[in-house]
Image (cartoon, rainbow, N blue to C red):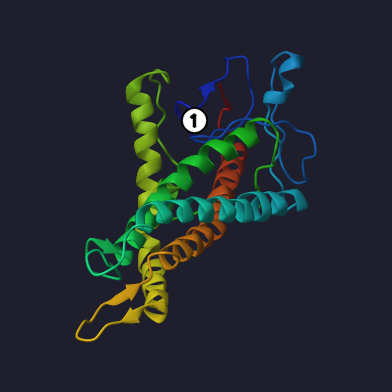
Amino acid sequence: MPRAAYPLFKPKQPTEKATADVEAVGPGGADGAASGSVTPVTTEPEDSHALAFRPPSDRFTLHQIFYLVVLHGIGAAFLGGGINFAVAYALYYDKGGPTSPIRLFQFPNTLAGDTAVTIFIQFASTWIIETIIVNWDLKTKGVQPIGFIPEPRRRFARWFMYLDRPERTDDTSTIAHWSRFVLSQLTRSLLLAAASFPIIFGASVGFLTLVGERHPNDWDWYYDPKWAPQIFKLVQGATLGIVITPLIAMFWLARCGWAMRDGERQPDR
C-alpha cells in the first residue's frame, strides 16, 4: 500500500526499512508494546530510536483507555464546553428584550441557527486538532496504535480512512501540498458532521423547546439572555467534545495500526 505524502511529516531516508504511514501519523517507539504486532525495523543510528512507532496493541490497554476517555473525552468536554460558554456569553449577554429577543428559530438571534453552525465548526476544529495531537503522540511514543480493529472493506469507508490512496511524490513543503492536506481533513470532518447533523440538531432543538417560553400569538420559543444560551452552549459543547473527540482520536490510532500492519513507510518531520 503506498505511503501518504502529507505536509505534517516527511518520509525518512531510503536507509529505513520501517513500516507505517498515516496522513498525519508520526512515529513512536517500541517500548511498552502489546503482543501480537510487528515492531518496525530501521537501519538508522541508535540515537534515532525514538522516531520508531510503538507496535500496535492486540487489545485496548489501560493507557489507551485513559488516553481516549480521560484526556480526549473528559478533557475535550471541559475545553469544548468552556469555549462555547464564552462564545455564547459574548454573543447574547446584551441581547433580549422586545427589540432583540433570543428565539429558537427566528432571526437575528436564533439558537437553532447557532446550534447548526456550532456542529460543523466543532466537528471541523476537533478533527484538525486531533489529527495534530494524536499523530504527535504517536510520533513521540506517547500512545500505542490500535492493532486489533479490522480494516474496512467498502470502497467509501476505505477512502474516508485514507486506505488505498495513490502514492504522491510532490514536495511536502509546498503550498499546494498543504492545501491538499487541509482540504482532505476538512472534507472528512464536514462529511462526518453532515452524517451526525440530524441526530445532534434534532436532539438540541427538542431540548430547547422544553426549556423555552412561549408568547401569546407567537409560534416561536423565547429565552432569557443572561444564562439560557450560555448554559445550553456549555452543555452542547461539552457533549460534542466528550462524544466525538475520543472517536476521532481512536480513528487515528487505528489508522496508524493499519498502516504499520500493511507495511507502509514511516513518515518523519
Dot 1: within a 10 Å radius of its alpha carbon, few (fewer than 14), some, or many (20 or more) residues?
many
- 228 or 208, nearer to the observer: 228
Residue at x 64%, y 36% (from the top left corner): 137
Q: How many numbered marks does the figure carry?
A: 1
Residue at x 75%, y 15% (from the top left corner): 47
Whether residue 95 sits left or right of residue 140 in the image: it is: left
Which residue extends farthest left? 217
- 141 or 58, nearer to the observer: 141
- 209 or 260, nearer to the observer: 209
Q: Quarter holding the C terminus?
A: top right
Whether residue 248 sits left or right of residue 175 in the image: it is: right
Location of residue 255 with respect to 80 vertically, above or below: above
**Residue that label 1 marks:** 3
The amino acid at mark 1 is Arg
Residue at x 58%, y 15% (from the top left corner): 13
Residue at x 44%, y 28% (from the top left corner): 6
User: In the rendering, at what x and y percent does residue 20 appear?
Assistant: 59, 33
Whether residue 22 sits left or right of residue 179 in the image: it is: right
User: In the rendering, at what x and y percent does residue 185 appear?
Assistant: 40, 41
Figure quadrant of residue 252? top right
